[in-house]
Image (spheres, rainbow, N blue to C red):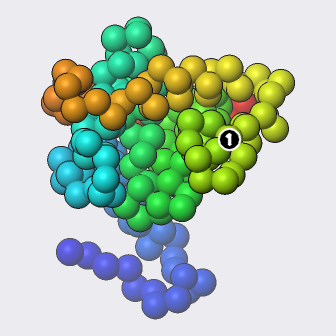
Amino acid sequence: MKKVNFTEMKNGSKEDYLFLDKLEKEYVSKTADRIIKYLHSYEETLEGYQISRFEHSLQAATRALRDNASDEMIVATLLHDIGDDLAPLNHAEYAAAILRPYVSEKTYWILLKHGEFQMYYYAHHLGADRNKRDKYKGHKYYDECVKFCEKWDQTSFDPNYKSLPLKEFEPLIKKIFSRKPYSSLDK
């Protein structure tokens, strides 16, 4: 394969950067395929739960779909814990960062904050503040994040729930990741 001529970025030519830009666009266009491939291998999980993180993600997304959520929110729900493997202490921020170019400000904010909002269900058992989310009261997406956690996230640890298979969500993943990236979060 052709390679650029430089070994330091400051020495790259216009030709080099046009070549790299073309390759980057091709690579970006395959993001959905890489995410789907990753999800197929998402069975390794934090121990102790009755189901895997993969099944949790499928359950949550199935619930969002059955509640007639937007395609964007269904995909965000499916991917909300995608950061658990590499960023267990800030998984919400990781998932939000992956989706940020492709989703609205609202969906991004919900993903970004869902980890803090989920603490409502367990933090008091560990001597922490279960109401940490209250600092966001009055925020325009506060109620939507509460809904996300209550209806789709915290309820999705049931080994008897019949979730849809990943193949049912693959067209939605491809649809969201084929969008022209948002130029800002103002939309």
Q: Is mark 1 on a helix, strand or loop?
A: loop
Residue 130 in sight: yes
The image position of residue 7, as x and y in percent, is 46, 90
Q: Position of residue 123 (x, y in %)?
A: 61, 46
* Residue 185 horizontal/vertical position (percent): 68, 35
> In screen coordinates, is 133 left or right of 76?
right
- Label 1 neighbour load within 10 Å: few <14, some 14-19, many 20+: some
Residue marked by disc 1: 130
Q: Is residue 55 left or right of residue 96?
A: left
Of residues 65 and 17, which is closer to you in this image?
65
Occupied quadrant, residue 86: bottom left
Q: Is residue 139 above or below residue 39?
A: above
| Residue type beneath disc 1 | Arg
Residue 183 seen by the camera: no
User: Residue 8 versus residue 145: which sits nearer the camera?
Assistant: 145
Which quadrant of the rendered structure holds the N terminus?
A: bottom left
Is residue 174 positioned above or below 18 on the image?
above
Q: Measuring 24% from the left and 51% from the top, which residue is drawn there?
A: 42
The residue under the point 49% across, 42% down is: 99
Give the quadrant of residue 4: bottom left
